[in-house]
Amino acid sequence: MRHHVEGPCSCETVSSGEKTSSAGERVAKVIARAGVCSRRDAERMIADGRVTVNGSVLTSPVLNVMYGDVITIDGRPLQRAERTRLWRYHKPTGTITAMRDPGGRPTVFDRLPSGMPRVMSVGRLDFNTEGLLLLTNDGELERYLELPQNAWLRRYKVRVRGTVDRKKLEPLKGGVTIAGIRYGPINIEIERDGKGNDHWLIVSIREGKNREVRNIMAFLGLKVMRLIRVEYGPFVLGDLPPGGIEEVSQGLLHSCLRGFFGERGP
């Protein structure tokens, strides 16, 4: 059963970087909006010769299509895009954020309730990381939420083991280079001290590079015992239990993502 979420949001307004043109839209963008895949994957399908427009096989994504053009993928007509939808999902530990895993590990999509439409994840969480994972049926929304220039705030609760040196936390607000990789501003607050050398930290970042939080903790000499993402942009995990999923209401979605809906048109 799906529910609607009326939780808080910060309603940041950021640009999607593109506007709908009277000359049509890029074919890869139209495929993404139909929820087939991300725009990047649509461009790969085109390069592989899997997409036709009005009977002609495409070899380049540099093509605008108009309403009424017939698009097929692998010989099947592209279905008309449904309304954009977004879900908050509490990804449990021990699942991989991928459609399938060659090693046979369980995936996020294996655990979704029956009756869910085809969805894609906004970014990824590591196998042993839990918490808020956004899912959408719209490849353009996925792209918008992942755009680096939008710099959505990602906030994590982290249980660590070791000695927290408070003097080392302040300089991280200006960013840090670890093993040749430059990380942007990092804000770390001590939420509470546990027993012995265990501590709960709140870590806020805006880039979300691969294993960023874990690498930062290792840099500080701390061992990660548990890692939970609790916020992504204006959306929060709230009290969703592991494996729980709730749909974001259309009103909240449009309110929080005015930049996306306002610039792409109806």
Image: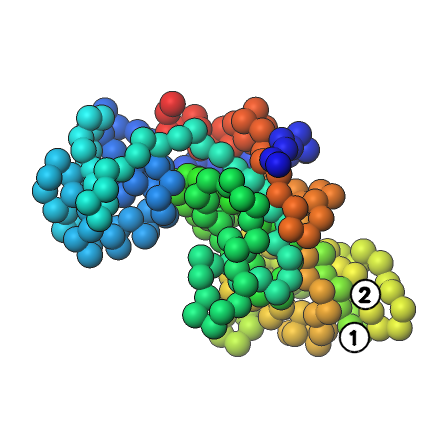
- Residue 28 placement (x, y as % from top left): 27, 43
Q: Please, which residue is most extreme toward the right here?
A: 195
Q: Which amino acid, mark 1?
A: Gly
Q: Nearer the viewer, residue 7 or 215?
A: 7
Q: Please, which residue is most extreme toward the left here?
A: 56
Q: Nearer the viewer, residue 171 or 55?
A: 55
Q: Which amino acid, mark 2?
A: His
- Residue 2 placement (x, y as % from top left): 60, 35
Q: Nearer the viewer, residue 109 or 134?
A: 109
Q: Which residue is mark 1?
A: 162
- Are there few (<14), some (14-19), or many (20+) residues within 10 Å of tag 1? some
Could you tell me which secondary element the residue under label 2 belongs to?
Answer: strand
- Residue 84 placement (x, y as % from top left): 45, 32
How far apart marks 2 and 1 lie (CA) works out to: 8 Å
- Are there few (<14), some (14-19), or many (20+) residues within 10 Å of tag 2? many
Is mark 2 in CB contact (under 8 Å) with mark 1? Answer: yes
In the figure, is residue 265 to the left or right of 55?
A: right
User: In the figure, 130 relative to 134: above or below?
Assistant: below
Q: Please, which residue is most extreme toward the front here?
A: 114
Could you tell me which secondary element the residue under label 1 belongs to?
Answer: loop
Q: Residue at x 60, y 46 (%)?
A: 89
Instruction: Please state, as top left, top right, bottom left or bottom right, where the N terminus lies in the image.
Output: top right
User: In the figure, 14 relative to 75: above or below?
Assistant: above
User: In the figure, 150 relative to 6: above or below?
Assistant: below
Q: Residue at x 49, y 69 (%)?
A: 104
Q: Residue at x 51, y 41 (%)?
A: 116
Q: Which residue is mark 2?
A: 199
In the figure, is residue 100 to the left or right of 227?
A: left
- Residue 10 placement (x, y as % from top left): 63, 35
